[in-house]
Image (spheres, rainbow, N blue to C red):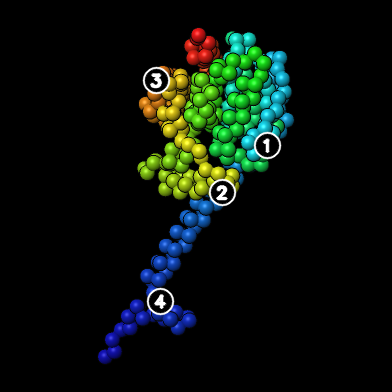
Amino acid sequence: MRRPVSNSNKMTPSGQKFKPTRVLRLLILAVVASWFGVVLYGALSVTMGLTVPLKGTVCCLEEPHEDVHFQTADGLTLSGWYVAPKNGAVIILFHAYYGDRRQTLPIAQMLVRHGYGVLMYDQRASGESQGEVRSLGWLDIPDARQAVAFAQSRPGVDKKRIGVYGCSMGGAIALAAAAGNPSIAAVAADAASPLTFGEARPQVGDPGWEFNLPVTALYYSFVALRAWTLPPTTTLAAAQAIAPRPLLLISSGESGERARVAALYNLAGEPKTHWNIPEAGHCGGPSIRPAEYEQRLVDFFNSSLLKP
Protein backbone atom coordinates (compact mmCIF):
# COMPACT_ATOMS: atom_id res chain seq x y z
CA MET A 1 0.00 0.00 0.00
CA ARG A 2 1.06 3.60 -0.66
CA ARG A 3 1.85 5.82 2.28
CA PRO A 4 -0.15 9.08 2.64
CA VAL A 5 1.59 12.16 1.35
CA SER A 6 2.60 14.51 4.18
CA ASN A 7 1.12 18.06 4.23
CA SER A 8 4.66 19.39 4.62
CA ASN A 9 5.28 18.46 1.03
CA LYS A 10 2.23 20.31 -0.19
CA MET A 11 3.07 22.27 -3.29
CA THR A 12 2.10 25.89 -3.88
CA PRO A 13 0.69 26.92 -7.28
CA SER A 14 4.19 28.05 -8.23
CA GLY A 15 5.53 24.57 -7.61
CA GLN A 16 7.40 25.40 -4.36
CA LYS A 17 6.80 23.76 -1.01
CA PHE A 18 4.66 25.73 1.46
CA LYS A 19 6.82 26.75 4.44
CA PRO A 20 4.93 28.24 7.42
CA THR A 21 8.17 29.41 9.08
CA ARG A 22 8.95 31.58 6.07
CA VAL A 23 5.51 33.18 6.25
CA LEU A 24 5.98 33.77 9.97
CA ARG A 25 9.34 35.44 9.38
CA LEU A 26 7.81 37.69 6.73
CA LEU A 27 4.99 38.66 9.08
CA ILE A 28 7.45 39.51 11.86
CA LEU A 29 9.55 41.52 9.43
CA ALA A 30 6.46 43.41 8.27
CA VAL A 31 5.42 44.18 11.86
CA VAL A 32 8.93 45.38 12.79
CA ALA A 33 9.18 47.50 9.64
CA SER A 34 5.78 49.03 10.37
CA TRP A 35 6.83 49.80 13.94
CA PHE A 36 10.00 51.50 12.74
CA GLY A 37 7.99 53.42 10.17
CA VAL A 38 5.52 54.68 12.78
CA VAL A 39 8.38 55.65 15.13
CA LEU A 40 10.21 57.50 12.36
CA TYR A 41 7.07 59.30 11.25
CA GLY A 42 6.27 60.23 14.83
CA ALA A 43 9.79 61.58 15.45
CA LEU A 44 9.77 63.60 12.22
CA SER A 45 6.33 65.03 13.00
CA VAL A 46 7.38 66.05 16.50
CA THR A 47 10.60 67.58 15.16
CA MET A 48 8.74 69.71 12.65
CA GLY A 49 6.35 70.90 15.35
CA LEU A 50 9.23 71.71 17.69
CA THR A 51 11.38 73.61 15.20
CA VAL A 52 8.88 75.47 13.00
CA PRO A 53 8.96 79.27 13.52
CA LEU A 54 6.10 80.80 15.50
CA LYS A 55 6.22 84.37 14.24
CA GLY A 56 3.60 87.09 14.27
CA THR A 57 2.77 90.60 15.40
CA VAL A 58 3.01 91.05 19.16
CA CYS A 59 0.79 93.49 21.07
CA CYS A 60 0.37 95.06 23.67
CA LEU A 61 1.98 96.23 26.92
CA GLU A 62 -0.01 98.82 28.85
CA GLU A 63 2.84 99.95 31.11
CA PRO A 64 5.06 102.74 29.74
CA HIS A 65 7.83 101.02 27.83
CA GLU A 66 10.20 101.09 24.89
CA ASP A 67 10.04 98.84 21.85
CA VAL A 68 13.60 97.55 21.73
CA HIS A 69 15.83 95.42 19.52
CA PHE A 70 19.23 93.84 20.07
CA GLN A 71 21.52 91.59 18.06
CA THR A 72 22.49 87.97 18.69
CA ALA A 73 26.09 86.82 18.27
CA ASP A 74 25.23 85.37 14.85
CA GLY A 75 23.56 88.55 13.59
CA LEU A 76 19.83 88.02 14.19
CA THR A 77 17.63 90.82 15.53
CA LEU A 78 15.53 90.01 18.58
CA SER A 79 12.56 92.24 19.41
CA GLY A 80 11.12 93.05 22.80
CA TRP A 81 9.78 95.50 25.34
CA TYR A 82 11.79 97.28 27.99
CA VAL A 83 10.46 98.96 31.11
CA ALA A 84 13.01 101.09 32.95
CA PRO A 85 13.55 100.36 36.65
CA LYS A 86 12.86 102.65 39.57
CA ASN A 87 15.14 100.70 41.90
CA GLY A 88 18.11 100.10 39.58
CA ALA A 89 17.36 96.38 39.10
CA VAL A 90 16.22 94.70 35.87
CA ILE A 91 14.69 91.23 35.53
CA ILE A 92 15.02 89.53 32.12
CA LEU A 93 11.97 87.39 31.35
CA PHE A 94 12.19 84.25 29.18
CA HIS A 95 8.93 83.02 27.71
CA ALA A 96 7.80 79.40 27.32
CA TYR A 97 8.55 77.42 24.18
CA TYR A 98 5.20 77.71 22.41
CA GLY A 99 4.78 81.43 22.90
CA ASP A 100 6.33 84.86 22.74
CA ARG A 101 7.02 87.72 25.17
CA ARG A 102 3.29 88.06 25.94
CA GLN A 103 3.45 84.83 27.94
CA THR A 104 5.51 86.69 30.56
CA LEU A 105 3.12 89.66 30.85
CA PRO A 106 1.65 88.63 34.25
CA ILE A 107 5.17 88.37 35.72
CA ALA A 108 6.22 91.68 34.16
CA GLN A 109 3.23 93.44 35.72
CA MET A 110 4.01 91.94 39.14
CA LEU A 111 7.60 93.17 39.03
CA VAL A 112 6.90 96.61 37.55
CA ARG A 113 4.45 97.31 40.38
CA HIS A 114 7.39 97.02 42.77
CA GLY A 115 9.80 99.24 40.90
CA TYR A 116 11.67 96.63 38.90
CA GLY A 117 12.66 97.12 35.31
CA VAL A 118 11.91 94.28 32.93
CA LEU A 119 13.28 93.17 29.59
CA MET A 120 10.91 90.79 27.86
CA TYR A 121 11.70 89.70 24.32
CA ASP A 122 10.73 87.15 21.69
CA GLN A 123 13.23 84.34 21.42
CA ARG A 124 14.60 83.59 17.97
CA ALA A 125 12.05 82.39 15.39
CA SER A 126 9.24 83.49 17.73
CA GLY A 127 6.98 86.54 17.78
CA GLU A 128 8.64 89.45 16.00
CA SER A 129 12.21 88.18 16.31
CA GLN A 130 14.28 86.92 13.41
CA GLY A 131 15.28 83.29 12.93
CA GLU A 132 14.04 80.33 10.93
CA VAL A 133 14.33 77.49 13.43
CA ARG A 134 13.44 76.96 17.07
CA SER A 135 15.85 74.70 18.89
CA LEU A 136 14.45 73.50 22.24
CA GLY A 137 16.09 76.56 23.76
CA TRP A 138 19.62 75.51 22.76
CA LEU A 139 20.28 78.53 20.52
CA ASP A 140 18.42 80.85 22.89
CA ILE A 141 20.78 80.22 25.79
CA PRO A 142 23.73 82.10 24.18
CA ASP A 143 21.32 84.89 23.15
CA ALA A 144 20.68 85.58 26.83
CA ARG A 145 24.20 86.98 27.11
CA GLN A 146 23.27 89.74 24.63
CA ALA A 147 20.06 90.36 26.57
CA VAL A 148 22.05 90.86 29.77
CA ALA A 149 24.51 93.20 28.04
CA PHE A 150 21.58 95.20 26.62
CA ALA A 151 19.94 95.56 30.05
CA GLN A 152 23.23 96.59 31.66
CA SER A 153 23.72 99.30 29.03
CA ARG A 154 20.48 101.11 29.86
CA PRO A 155 20.51 104.36 31.87
CA GLY A 156 19.71 103.98 35.56
CA VAL A 157 20.54 100.26 35.70
CA ASP A 158 22.94 98.88 38.29
CA LYS A 159 24.98 96.28 36.38
CA LYS A 160 25.18 94.12 39.48
CA ARG A 161 21.40 93.98 39.86
CA ILE A 162 20.35 91.79 36.92
CA GLY A 163 18.02 88.87 37.58
CA VAL A 164 16.31 86.33 35.32
CA TYR A 165 12.97 84.54 35.39
CA GLY A 166 11.39 81.95 33.12
CA CYS A 167 8.76 79.24 33.11
CA SER A 168 8.88 75.88 31.29
CA MET A 169 11.55 76.13 28.57
CA GLY A 170 12.01 79.74 29.68
CA GLY A 171 12.96 78.38 33.10
CA ALA A 172 15.54 76.07 31.54
CA ILE A 173 16.98 79.00 29.55
CA ALA A 174 17.14 81.08 32.74
CA LEU A 175 19.08 78.35 34.57
CA ALA A 176 21.48 77.71 31.70
CA ALA A 177 22.00 81.40 30.98
CA ALA A 178 22.89 82.09 34.61
CA ALA A 179 25.21 79.09 34.79
CA GLY A 180 27.31 80.57 32.00
CA ASN A 181 27.13 84.24 32.96
CA PRO A 182 28.19 85.53 36.40
CA SER A 183 26.62 88.91 35.59
CA ILE A 184 23.24 87.34 36.39
CA ALA A 185 22.85 87.85 40.12
CA ALA A 186 19.64 85.91 40.88
CA VAL A 187 17.59 83.20 39.16
CA ALA A 188 13.90 82.28 39.45
CA ALA A 189 12.79 79.26 37.41
CA ASP A 190 9.26 77.87 37.36
CA ALA A 191 8.82 74.30 36.06
CA ALA A 192 12.11 74.30 34.14
CA SER A 193 11.92 71.91 31.18
CA PRO A 194 14.63 69.34 30.39
CA LEU A 195 17.22 70.42 27.84
CA THR A 196 18.57 67.00 26.81
CA PHE A 197 17.36 63.53 25.93
CA GLY A 198 19.03 62.17 29.04
CA GLU A 199 16.81 64.37 31.18
CA ALA A 200 13.64 63.83 29.14
CA ARG A 201 14.07 60.10 28.46
CA PRO A 202 10.89 58.11 29.17
CA GLN A 203 11.48 55.34 31.68
CA VAL A 204 10.99 51.68 30.79
CA GLY A 205 7.64 50.66 32.18
CA ASP A 206 6.01 54.07 31.75
CA PRO A 207 2.76 54.00 29.73
CA GLY A 208 3.68 53.85 26.04
CA TRP A 209 7.44 53.75 26.74
CA GLU A 210 8.09 51.28 23.90
CA PHE A 211 6.98 53.99 21.45
CA ASN A 212 7.85 57.17 23.33
CA LEU A 213 11.43 56.15 24.12
CA PRO A 214 12.64 55.75 20.51
CA VAL A 215 10.57 58.71 19.30
CA THR A 216 12.11 60.95 21.97
CA ALA A 217 15.63 59.73 21.18
CA LEU A 218 15.13 60.36 17.48
CA TYR A 219 13.54 63.80 17.71
CA TYR A 220 16.30 65.13 19.96
CA SER A 221 18.77 63.98 17.29
CA PHE A 222 16.67 65.47 14.50
CA VAL A 223 16.40 68.83 16.30
CA ALA A 224 20.18 68.87 16.64
CA LEU A 225 20.50 68.34 12.89
CA ARG A 226 17.78 70.84 12.07
CA ALA A 227 19.26 73.58 14.28
CA TRP A 228 22.85 72.44 13.66
CA THR A 229 23.70 72.70 17.33
CA LEU A 230 23.76 70.66 20.53
CA PRO A 231 22.44 71.58 23.98
CA PRO A 232 25.15 73.65 25.71
CA THR A 233 24.35 72.14 29.11
CA THR A 234 21.71 70.28 31.07
CA THR A 235 19.32 71.81 33.57
CA LEU A 236 20.86 69.59 36.26
CA ALA A 237 24.38 70.84 35.54
CA ALA A 238 23.15 74.43 35.29
CA ALA A 239 21.45 74.27 38.68
CA GLN A 240 24.72 73.16 40.27
CA ALA A 241 26.64 76.06 38.69
CA ILE A 242 24.50 78.91 40.04
CA ALA A 243 25.59 78.97 43.70
CA PRO A 244 26.47 81.12 45.57
CA ARG A 245 23.93 83.26 43.70
CA PRO A 246 20.35 82.89 45.02
CA LEU A 247 18.04 80.41 43.28
CA LEU A 248 14.25 80.12 43.49
CA LEU A 249 12.73 76.96 42.01
CA ILE A 250 8.95 76.64 41.58
CA SER A 251 6.93 73.55 40.67
CA SER A 252 3.31 72.54 40.22
CA GLY A 253 1.37 69.56 41.50
CA GLU A 254 2.21 67.44 38.45
CA SER A 255 4.19 64.51 39.86
CA GLY A 256 6.80 64.33 37.11
CA GLU A 257 7.43 68.06 37.23
CA ARG A 258 7.59 68.13 41.01
CA ALA A 259 10.17 65.32 41.02
CA ARG A 260 12.23 66.99 38.28
CA VAL A 261 12.35 70.31 40.14
CA ALA A 262 13.15 68.52 43.40
CA ALA A 263 16.14 66.91 41.67
CA LEU A 264 17.33 70.36 40.58
CA TYR A 265 16.92 71.63 44.12
CA ASN A 266 18.87 68.72 45.62
CA LEU A 267 21.82 69.36 43.31
CA ALA A 268 21.86 73.15 43.67
CA GLY A 269 24.02 74.90 46.22
CA GLU A 270 22.89 77.43 48.80
CA PRO A 271 21.12 79.82 48.93
CA LYS A 272 18.16 78.05 47.34
CA THR A 273 14.40 77.71 47.78
CA HIS A 274 11.87 75.25 46.34
CA TRP A 275 8.23 76.31 46.38
CA ASN A 276 5.67 73.74 45.27
CA ILE A 277 2.11 74.75 44.35
CA PRO A 278 0.22 71.43 44.57
CA GLU A 279 -3.07 72.59 43.03
CA ALA A 280 -1.43 74.30 40.03
CA GLY A 281 -0.83 72.88 36.59
CA HIS A 282 2.29 73.50 34.51
CA CYS A 283 3.20 77.21 34.84
CA GLY A 284 -0.18 77.80 36.49
CA GLY A 285 1.06 79.41 39.69
CA PRO A 286 0.47 83.06 38.67
CA SER A 287 -3.19 82.36 37.91
CA ILE A 288 -3.86 79.95 40.80
CA ARG A 289 -2.19 82.01 43.54
CA PRO A 290 -1.54 85.44 42.00
CA ALA A 291 -1.07 87.41 45.22
CA GLU A 292 1.21 84.84 46.86
CA TYR A 293 3.16 84.30 43.64
CA GLU A 294 3.78 88.03 43.35
CA GLN A 295 4.82 88.35 46.98
CA ARG A 296 7.20 85.40 46.88
CA LEU A 297 8.77 86.49 43.61
CA VAL A 298 9.22 90.10 44.74
CA ASP A 299 10.55 89.03 48.15
CA PHE A 300 13.07 86.77 46.43
CA PHE A 301 14.39 89.48 44.12
CA ASN A 302 14.32 92.11 46.90
CA SER A 303 16.50 89.95 49.13
CA SER A 304 18.75 88.89 46.25
CA LEU A 305 19.25 92.17 44.39
CA LEU A 306 18.37 95.15 46.59
CA LYS A 307 20.22 94.47 49.82
CA PRO A 308 23.42 96.56 50.17
Q: Are marks 4 and 3 in contact (CB under 8 Å)?
A: no
Name the residue beneath numbered marker 3. Answer: 270
Q: Amino acid at mark 4?
A: Phe
Labels 4 and 3: the sequence-earlier one:
4
How far from the left and from the top, in percent, is residue 206? 39, 40
Crowding at mark 1 (Cα within 10 Å: few <14, some 14-19, many 20+) = some
Q: Residue furthest left?
A: 1
Mark 2, mark 1: which one is toward the viewer? 1
Q: Amino acid at mark 3?
A: Glu
For mark 4, give the secondary structure. Answer: loop
Labels 2 and 1: the sequence-earlier one:
1
Q: Are marks 2 and 1 in contact (CB under 8 Å)?
A: no
Q: Which residue sits at x=44%, y=79%?
A: 12
Is 260 displayed left or right of 127 in the figure? Answer: left
Mark 4, mark 3: which one is toward the viewer? 3
Labels 1 and 3: the sequence-earlier one:
1
Name the residue beneath numbered marker 4. Answer: 18
Kindly indicate the quadrant of the structure image that contains residue 17: bottom left
Crowding at mark 2 (Cα within 10 Å: few <14, some 14-19, many 20+) = few
Kindly indicate the quadrant of the structure image that contains residue 56: top right
Q: Are marks 2 and 4 in contact (CB under 8 Å)?
A: no
| Cα–Cα span, label 1 and label 3 | 36 Å
Name the residue beneath numbered marker 1. Answer: 76
Q: Is residue 275 above or below residue 145?
A: above
Name the residue beneath numbered marker 2. Answer: 225
Labels 2 and 3: the sequence-earlier one:
2
